[in-house]
Image (spheres, rainbow, N blue to C red):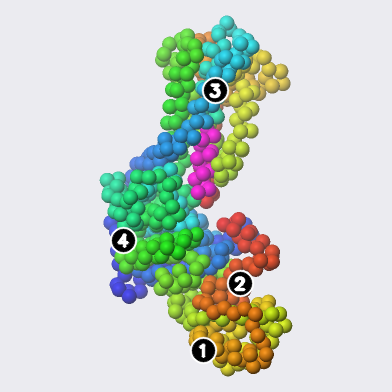
Amino acid sequence: MDQRAITVEGLVKRFKTLVAVDGVSFDVPAGTVFGLLGPNGAGKTTIVRVLATILHPDGGHAEVMGYDVADQAELVRYQIGLAGQSAAVDANLTGRENLKLIGSLAQMPRRQTGKRADELLERFDLAFAAGRPARTYSGGMRRRLDVAAALVARPPILFLDEPTTGLDIQSRKELWAVIRELVADGSTVLLTTQYLEEADQLADRIAVIDHGRVVANDTASALKSRLGSTVIEIGMASEEAAGKAQSLLAARNGGGHPELDGSTVWLTSRDGAGALVDVLRSLDAQGLAPATLAVREPSLDDVFLALTGKHAVCDVADTECEKRLEAERRAA
Amino acid sequence: MSTPAITIPAGRRGPQGLSGRPARAIRDALSIADRNLIAYRRVPQLLVFSTIQPVIFVLLFRYVFGGAIRVPGGISYVDYLIPGIFVQTVVFGAINTAVGLSADVGSGMLERFRALPMARSAVLAGRTLADLARNVFVVALMAGVGFAVGFRVHTNALYFLGGLVLVLAFAYAMSWVFATVGLAVGDPETAQAAAFPVMAPLVFASSAFVPVSSMPSWLQGFAGHQPVSVVASAVRGLALGGPTASYLLQAIAWCVGIIVVCAPLAVWRYRRTV
């Protein structure tokens, strides 16, 4: 029962001097969805490219369905489908031609590719546009075609590399529904995303990636309970006032560990509404009035801040951070 | 969790041993060639550079500059010009190979191909094959245009067809040169910009439009021996008579030499391009 579809051990990938993947290890049991969560430049896409045999690893070991990605790349390619930012559809071919092309290049018998293409176009709500060049498709249609292309040869393993980045909410939810269906069919999915909500919605387990390392590997609910279900952000009038508020809230018995970021105090809690009343009461008792107040669900940035003490995206003025991210993007 | 279904569907186990690999390489190259030819049919702009531009050159040199150009050997300028136009056309057309491949690099298409169990040779073989098919069409069209403006074959149809085959062989060799360029640059605009400085001296400092003997002596050494001149002279020999054998041998040597050097270079570039 505990059959592992993907095994990654101490994986390393360098681009010149930059270490994009720095000793990553994780396992994906067959028939599950595994999420790689992290910001741009964290190394998620590089991990997928190595597992999809596009890049050669510089160290460590990775297996897909028991085949080594470095030494048995050819056999690995028969097991996988790839969609998202690591792959593309041909804008000049029609939806149907794109799927047929991928089918024949995946070594399906030529006779079957047409039938399979029609099946997938139907399933992904693209039958109405089957004969139109993909160039004329909307963003959401193109992504659906992209995911369909990954499925043509019925591979047991799917790599979805940021499948919904840049899509509107509606298209994103449609694609989520499709991905859930795939898993119900028994596929194993490795998903990368920048959205905590997406990983939460789809993944059985989530590895949080930062600077090419796994900083957490847990179920979505465990990650969230570590973090608290609600984030309370209190904007104070000055950094000084924020400092006072932080020490005040830290001394409070209500739980949660307040973090200070400029003039903002940031606190997570399992008991959103109750904690909020409590926080405001304590502040008021000391004559500290918040300038702004926000209560929201945790985002990727909150997970990051909690796990690494850093923001997932650069602060506006942090040129050092932006330079580093830019260098990583270029190298990738 | 339900029992995971991880049975590998039939046919997903990959090739057993090495048998069937050459067949797969041919099949995959044809699939890629077919895909590239669809793009030429569907995006007519891609064919414009390879058809409208040479027609304009024919008209320009035949009716505007031609009157001022003297060619040796008592042949008319239009007969001198058209073999040169064939060669110029396929050299300029080879930019399509660079543009197409660089677009595939930029769009992420190559990544998708690399994750598929297809022959590693297929992308380059299919691309150069599609460009050869495009050149058959373009060269036939230019022959028609040539005859329409007064070009006549002085030898016989078989020699003339031999000349066209030589032009296509040279076109195929040039495709490999520009495949290397396209993979190196990674976007179509840069590919165009990078290709022009390579092809302009080849085409214009050659015997394609004017006799090399009319050029300054310091240029004649290059202009007389570079591939465009040699191939143009060989095609002229085949179509019009006169000295042919030496040019033909040199032209074949250039075609083979270019492929022997550039094909491995392009394959090496392809292997390290993502």
Residue that mark 3 sits on = B56
State whether discs 1 and 3 lie on one chain.
no
Decide if residue A272 is on the left or right side of residue A113.
Answer: right
Residue occupying the far top of the picture = B74
Residue that mark 4 sits on = B8
Residue type of the residue flagged with mark 1 = Gly
Q: Does residue B238 lie above or below A92 as drawn? A: above
Q: Which class describes the residues within 10 Å of circle 2: few (<14), some (14-19), or many (20+)?
A: some
Q: Nearer the viewer, residue B164 or B193?
A: B193
Locate the N terminus of chain A by quadrant: bottom left
**What label sits on residue A50 in the rendered view?**
none
Decide if residue A72 is on the left or right side of residue A208.
Answer: left
Label 3 chain ID:
B
Residue that mark 1 sits on = A274
Residue that mark 2 sits on = A311
Predominant secondary structure, magenta span: helix
Label 2: which secondary element: loop
State how far apart marks 1 and 4 are (Cα): 52 Å
Residue drawn at point x = 41 percent, y = 52 percent: B116
Label 1: which secondary element: helix
Residue type of the residue flagged with mark 4 = Ile
